[in-house]
Structure formats: C-alpha cells, structure tokens
Image (tube, rainbow, N blue to C red):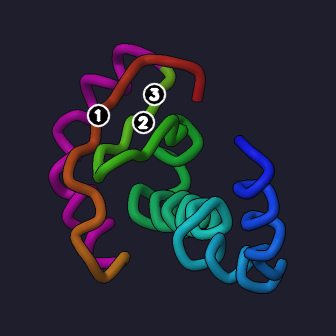
C-alpha cells in the first residue's frame, strides 16, 4: 500500500455507529441474534426433553447440524426431522431451515 492509498483510507473512516448498524443488520451481531433466536425456537419446537438431549452445532446456508447424545436418540429422532423443520420454518416466519442433519456427539 503506497502513501496515496493510506491517505485516502484515513479520509474515508467510517463512524462506529455505521459499523454497529452494519453488523446488526448483516454482520456478526445479526448472526448472533439469529443464532439465539434459532436456539430458542429449537427448544420450543422439540420440547424440553429432546432439547436436553440435543445441541445445535452449526447452522449455515439453511443446513442445521444437531448433535444428539447417542445412537438410540439418532434413530428415534430421525423420524421427526421433517416435522421439526416444518415447525421451525413456521415459527421463524420464513423458510430458513432447509435441512436438519443429526450427528452423534456431545449435546
């Protein structure tokens, strides 16, 4: 980066308010807000018993990966995936979840 580029960047500083607004609308703060909302909707959708035995591991591009406590729960819950997906999208108000993948892991 040469001297002219550095001078130009200093003149084009962005206010902290704009940075926070951008983050809240499409950045990290937006992600965290949606993550918290999705986690709460998950608990409401599956109920307290299933929520205690599951944990959302990731959510990216509509694909939610959920850890379950063991093979028995994986087998039991796989029949409920489509119903959960449908109910989550209804609660969310949009088709946000396109796929739910269950994995055995620490919940």
Nearest the viewer among 73 and 67 is 67
- Under circle 3, the secondary element is strand
In percent of width and height, residue 62 lies at 29, 52
Judging by the rendered image, the residue that carries numbered circle 1 is: 101
Q: Are marks 2 and 1 in contact (CB under 8 Å)?
A: yes
- The magenta-colored residue range is 70-91
Disc on the earlier residue, 2 or 1: 2
In percent of width and height, residue 85 lies at 24, 57
Judging by the rendered image, the residue that carries numbered circle 3 is: 68
Query: In this rendering, does residue 54 appear at all?
Result: no
Mark 2 neighbour density, 10 Å: few (under 14) some (14–19) many (20 or more) = many
Query: In this rendering, does residue 84 appear at all?
Result: yes
Q: Are marks 3 and 2 in contact (CB under 8 Å)?
A: yes
**Residue 66 tag number:** 2
Mark 1 neighbour density, 10 Å: few (under 14) some (14–19) many (20 or more) = some
Q: Quadrant of residue 27?
A: bottom right
């Amino acid at each position: 980066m040469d001297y002219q580029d550095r001078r130009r960047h200093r003149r084009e500083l962005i206010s902290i308010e704009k940075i926070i607004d951008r983050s809240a609308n499409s950045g990290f703060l937006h992600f965290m807000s949606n993550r918290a909302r999705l986690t709460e909707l998950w608990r409401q959708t599956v109920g307290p018993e299933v929520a205690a035995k599951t944990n959302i591991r990731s959510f990216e591009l509509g694909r939610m990966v959920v850890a379950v406590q063991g093979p028995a729960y994986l087998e039991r819950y796989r029949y409920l995936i489509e119903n959960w997906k449908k109910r989550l999208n209804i609660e969310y108000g949009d088709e946000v979840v396109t796929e739910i993948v269950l994995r055995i892991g620490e919940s």
